[in-house]
Image: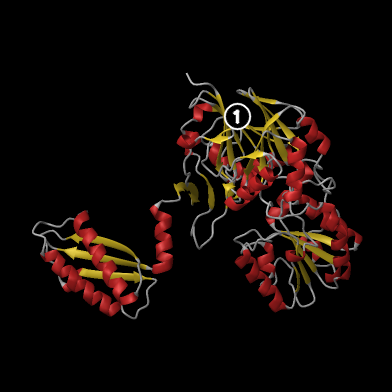
Amino acid sequence: MAKERLIYLPLGGAGEIGMNMYVYGYGHPGKERLIVVDAGVSFPDMDNTPGVKLIMADFDWLIERDTQVEAIFLTHGHLDHVGAIPFLAEYFDVPMYARPFSIKVAEARLLEHGVIGDNLQTINDPSKYIEAGPFSVRFLPISHSIPESSALVIDTPEGRIIHTGDFKIDQLPIIGDPFDPDAVEEESEVEVIALVCDSTNVLEDRNGRSESSISENILELITRCKGLVVATTFASHIARVYQFAKIAEQCQRSVLLLGNAIERMVGYAVETNVIPDLPNVVSLAQAKNIPRHKLLVLATGSQGEPRAATAQLARGTLFKGIQLKKGDTVIYSSKTIPGNEKLVGKIKNKFAALGVDIIDEPSNDYHVSGHPPQGDLEEIHQVINPNLIIPMHGEYRHLSTHAEVAQTNGFKSVIAPNGTMVNILTGSIIAEESFNPERIYLDGHFLIGSQNRVVLNRLKMARNGCVKVSLLLKGNVFRKNGLKIQALGLTDMGMKDLRKSIHKDIAQLVKTFHRRINSDDTEIVGKIEKITLRLTRSIFDKNPLIMVEIFQLDE
């Protein structure tokens, strides 16, 4: 039997931002005992995934090996790391480990999807090792833009792996665990055979900044503001929310939380003792009696979500008793995620039309990233001094740039996009066991593959419309009123010519069939589809979705 091996396999998050899901395995080839790190989602858009609720990594590879999976570990509570937990929970009856704040987020996800969370295991003591088959895993507190983020120290029979999760080097993060270089260095006293490391911000050729570095800027800004102030940021960024609340208190402004997500996240933070409480918070009823210049609204929707509080306020109408007007200020204390620029831009334009002052993220005065730029990456590379660096979490350009940074400083590195299996001990790709993973869509209540015709048909209809041909036959004969053509998404101009041409060509087609045509006759259905598509292209210059129905009258 072949020698045991130690493998790494990203299923999501490597070659894209979001959908994080990583697998480690140890044992004989094909029989490895496995652990899973993170189970995240990303979100759809109308241009590519109309009607879809969530997108996640395809975990069929894991399902085929369900008896080999030992445990699931969650590095932190962002949805691109925990959002897919309800779907894994239905397939894998294994412990799912996370720290208290992340457990609260995971529990909410399970409840939302009607899944029992019996397997969630709260890690109150990060220094405690968890045994999972041949792996011994410990949470290593690390700074990020959500409370209780952790790297994972993964001890294996072949040596130690450190999986950073999302992180930044921040020793003064306001709320949450500071980056502790001594703790990281202590973990690296044992030889680290592989560092699997966040690449999200590697394109920034600089050192990172602390969360506390923007406090004075925010204070100075809000002090200058004369009217109502709205600050929008990620609901999970408790340090930023807390920072705004404390500064509002200094400016003698009351704080109103606007949006379910931010209320929920603050509740989790208080419940898990991440913060003692959010200062100076008032209810909606109380806010109505507070002068505008004495109020700070912390609102959800920094990424342009159409139903979130920020988008509602941009309408200029009364929303939960709050209405923006000229002289008010909206502060975007967040980075716009790539792909969300259009949505965010539309809302900013609406604010501009209202005469509202917009303070956004390009200034970098009121936002710092939760991910490591090159300077931070180089520092952690040096502190850990691993035998191998595997870039993860980022698009391909992030992974390749990260590998170049590592190699420039003398470290061995391998680029492993989704579906690429790596032999950690040799630092090489196992090509014969690598594959190109699909995406899974949550479509209503159902999980479907990204190549499912349902979504592809929606895209086709959205771009080119739909033509439905209904044929009523008696034997192999139909009259003029036995053909019905319906079109959606096509202009009325040209429909008369389309109906006339289709009637003529289909009448000739039907005559060529000397056997009875049935409703499930794939041959004639295919020919009608081709005729309809050809004529629609000719008349409309469109390639619509074609639907054909055949009905037979009893003779």
On screen, 102 above or below 280?
Answer: above
What residue is disc 1 on?
425
Residue 458 shows in the view = yes
Who is closer to the viewer here, 284 or 213? 213
Is residue 260 shown above or below 136? below
Q: Residues within 10 Å of mark 1 (few under 14, many from 20)?
A: some
Q: Position of residue 325 (x, y in %)?
A: 75, 76
Numbered disc total: 1
Q: Describe the colour scheme in one phrase.
A: secondary structure
Picture layout, residue 499 above or below residue 271 = below
Q: Is residue 374 left or right of residue 499?
A: right
SS label for mark 1: loop
Q: Residue at x 63, y 48 (%)?
A: 79
Dot 1 amino acid type: Leu
Percent across and percent down for residue 88 are 54, 38
Quick check: can you spot residue 445? no
Of all residues, the one furthest to the left in this rendering is 514
- Locate residue 294: give its quadrant: bottom right
